[in-house]
Image: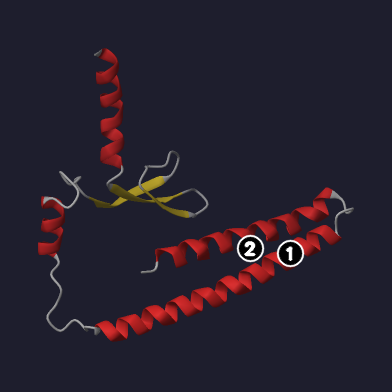
């Protein structure tokens, strides 16, 4: 019982902090937007929301009621949206093909430079990793399309 209370007492501040957005600036002027107040930085609260009681519950209804769609908001027909979605898929497919080619070129350059010192290889490794992350992101985005 004591363990449960301890865990709950530690988790409650985290739940409250997750619904607060801070703008923090360090001594050198670097700005960080985060949901956790950063130590040794000047932080101001940008927004703070109370957690919804349940997903899709009254919290979602209150947000929808607070910000209704204006009557003159532009509407898009279903066919036009399908065309836009098709264009988006085509663009993402083209970007994916380009990133796959760039990843292969970067891998080839890394293999060709195989006997170079480690400090010379690191930028090539970083480039390969960048293209691989881009490929994964594009695949994920394509997977999210309807």
Labelled pair 1, 2 in contact (Cβ < 8 Å): yes
Image point (25%, 32%), residue name? 12
Check disc 2 and report the residue beneath it: 131
Of the numbered discs 1 and 2, the one sitting upstream in the chain is 1
Query: For residue 8, what is the image quadrant?
Result: top left
Q: Say what secondary structure mark 2 lies in.
A: helix
Query: Tag on residue 32?
Result: none
| Residue in front for this viewpoint, 82 or 116 | 82
Tell me if mark 1 has few (under 14), some (14-19) or many (20+) residues whose alpha carbon lies within 10 angstroms of its own: many
Compared with 134, 35 (above or below) is: above
Figure quadrant of the C terminus: bottom left
Image quarter of residue 51: top left
CA distance for labels 1 and 2? 8 Å
Question: What percent of the width, then of the height, locates residue 18?
Answer: 31, 43
Q: Is residue 53 left or right of residue 92?
A: left
- In terms of secondary structure, where does tag 1 sit? helix
In the picture of the structure, the residue carrying the numbered disc 1 is 106
Residue at 30% across, 16% down: 3
Does residue 76 appear left or right of residue 37 in this picture? left
User: Image quarter for residue 37?
Assistant: top left
Query: Residue drawn at (41%, 80%), measured in percent from left and top?
Result: 86
Q: Position of residue 32 (x, y in %)?
A: 44, 53
Which of the pair 49/2 is nearer the observer?
A: 2
Q: Residue at x 17, y 45 (%)?
A: 54
Rendered position, 49 above or below 69: above
Q: Quadrant of the N terminus?
A: top left
């Amino acid at each position: 019982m004591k363990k449960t209370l301890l865990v709950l007492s530690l988790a409650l501040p985290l739940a409250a902090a997750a619904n607060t957005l801070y703008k923090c600036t360090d001594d050198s002027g670097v700005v960080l937007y985060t949901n956790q107040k950063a130590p040794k930085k000047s932080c101001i609260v940008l927004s703070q929301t109370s957690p919804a009681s349940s997903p899709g519950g009254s919290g979602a209804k209150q947000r929808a009621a607070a910000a209704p769609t204006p009557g003159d908001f532009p509407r898009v027909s279903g066919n036009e949206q399908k065309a836009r979605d098709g264009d988006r898929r085509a663009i993402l497919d083209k970007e994916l093909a380009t990133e796959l080619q760039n990843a292969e070129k970067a891998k080839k350059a890394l293999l060709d430079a195989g006997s170079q010192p480690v400090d010379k290889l690191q930028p090539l490794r970083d480039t390969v990793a960048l293209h691989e992350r881009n490929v994964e992101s594009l695949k994920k985005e394509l997977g999210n399309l309807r």
